[in-house]
Amino acid sequence: MSDNQFFKPTVLYKEYMILDMIEKNPNITQREMSKTIGIAVSMINDYLNIYEKDKLIKREKHSTKTVEYFVTKKGSERRKLLNIWYLKSSNNIYIQAKDNIISFLNQIIEKGFKKIILYGAGEVAEIILQVMNDDNQIPLEVVAVIDDNKDRVGDKLVNLPIITLNELSKYSHDGIMISSYKHHETIHNNLKKIDYPQNKIIRFFDN
C-alpha cells in the first residue's frame, strides 16, 4: 500500500493489512507495519491494543524488544471477511473505470477507427488492453504499441509487440492513440515531426 499513492488506507483496510501481515510473519515489528501502511508506530500500537482486546490477536513477549504476534481463529475469520469487503469495493471501482474506458473506445469506433496503435507502453496502455481483452466484443483492434524507451522495444505488452516509431509503416492501422499522461505532449510532437496526420491522432487525455 505504501507504493500506491492513489488510495489512502481506511480504518478497515488498516485492520485487514495488520492482521494479514501478522498472519504471514508473527515476528514482524511495529516499525515494519508502520512503514508498510504509512502511519505512525504509536498508531500501530493503538490498533494492536484494540485487536488484542477484541481477541483478534495474541502477543507473546520474549523480551522488552522482542514480541511475537499471533492471529487468533476469530482474527483469521475477521481477516477473510475484510478481504472480501475490500475485493468487492475494488471491483466496483474497476467496473466504473472500465465503463469509462469502454465509453471512450466506443467514441473512437463511431469516428471510424477500426485498427489502431497505442503510443506509450505504460500503465495506461496496459489497462486499456486488459479492458479490451475482458470485453472481446469491442470492434476495435490494437496491432502494436510504440514506446520511446529502447529498453522496452522488442518486449510485449499484453501479447502485443512493443515497437519504435520508425517501425510504424510495418503495421497496417488507421490511427494512433496516445496512451501516456506524463509524456502525451512529447508524443504528440514526435508524431508532428514525422507529419503523421493530425486527424488520425487519438488523445486519450484530451478528448
Image: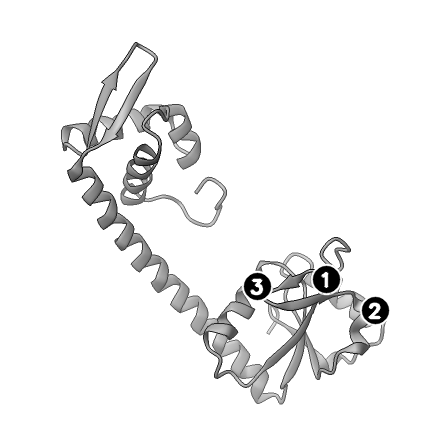
Q: Are marks 3 and 1 in contact (CB under 8 Å)?
A: no
| Left or right relative to 157: residue 191 | right
SS type, badge 2: helix
**Front in this rendered view, residue 120 or 111:** 120
Pick whichever of labels 2 and 1 is earlier in the sequence: 1
| Left or right relative to 161: residue 54 | left
| Left or right relative to 133: residue 170 | right
- Please name the residue shown 38% across and 30% down the image: 33
Relative to residue 16, is residue 187 depicted above or below? below
Q: Quadrant of residue 13?
A: top left
Pick whichever of labels 2 and 3 is earlier in the sequence: 3
Residue topped by disc 2:
166
Q: Are marks 2 and 3 in contact (CB under 8 Å)?
A: no
Q: How many marks?
A: 3
Q: Quadrant of residue 58?
A: top left
SS type, badge 3: helix
SS type, badge 1: loop
Residue topped by disc 3:
126
Q: CA distance from mark 3 to mark 1?
A: 13 Å
Colouring rule applied to residues: one colour
Residue topped by disc 1:
147
Relative to residue 5, is residue 168 depicted above or below? below
Quick one: quadrant of the N terminus?
A: top left
Where's residue 74, x and y in %? 15, 39
- Please name the residue shown 28% across and 12% down the image: 62
- Please name the residue shown 37% across and 26% down the image: 28
Q: Quadrant of residue 85?
A: bottom left
**Few, some or many residues within 10 Å of mark 2 (<14, 14–19, 20+):** few
Where's residue 143, x and y in %? 66, 76
